[in-house]
Each structure stands twice: as structure tokens, then as C-alpha cells.
Amino acid sequence: MADWGPVLVAVVLFVLLSPGLLFQLPGRNRFIEFGNFQTSGVSILIHTAIFFGLVAIFLIAIGIHVSAG
């Protein structure tokens, strides 16, 4: 049986944490901007760190597992 938990968590977080899609931290004009569809290098680094932290929490600390089959 395959464990789909890590795949689902990574895909959902990747979509939600794409800089500029839902929010951008830091924004171009303000600290946080919502739905501006623009990004910067600093924003990419911050969103990458947030993604890594949340994936580590969900997969290692909590241990989410979704079995198929």
C-alpha cells in the first residue's frame, strides 16, 4: 500500500504558499500583500522557509499518513 500523506501535504502547501498567489510576505509596497500575482527574491526565500517548516511539522512531528488501496 502506498502512503500518499507526504505527497498530498507537499502539493497543498506548495499551492497555498506560492508567493503572490494568496499572499506575499514581504510585499512590494507593504509588509504583506494579498493576491497581487507578483513576487521577489526575498519573498521566495521567506515562503520557502515557511514551506519547509510546515512540511517538517506535518510530516515528521505529526506524522500524517494517507493509505490508498
Image: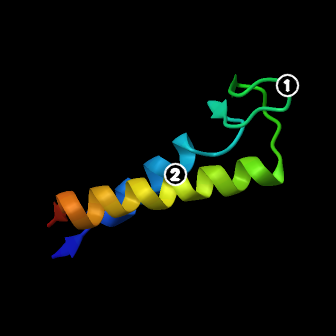
Q: Position of residue 15 (x, y in %)?
A: 55, 46
Q: Which residue is mark 1?
A: 29
Q: Which residue is mark 2?
A: 50
**Residue at coordinates 39% horizontally, 59% vertically from top-left?**
55
Q: Secondary structure at mark 1?
A: loop
Q: Nearer the viewer, residue 11 or 34?
A: 34
Q: Position of residue 53 (x, y in %)?
A: 43, 57
**Residue at coordinates 63% horizontally, 46% vertically from top-left?**
18
Q: Position of residue 27 (x, y in %)?
A: 77, 32
Q: CA distance from mark 2 to mark 1?
A: 21 Å
The disc at residue 37 is none
- For label 1, the crowd category at 10 Å Cα-Cα, with few meaning under 14, some 14 to 19 and many 20 or more, is few
Left or right side of 25 for 60? left
The extreme front residue here reads 31
Left or right side of 48 for 53? left
**Residue at coordinates 62% horizontally, 30% vertically from top-left?**
22
Relative to 2, residue 59 above or below: above
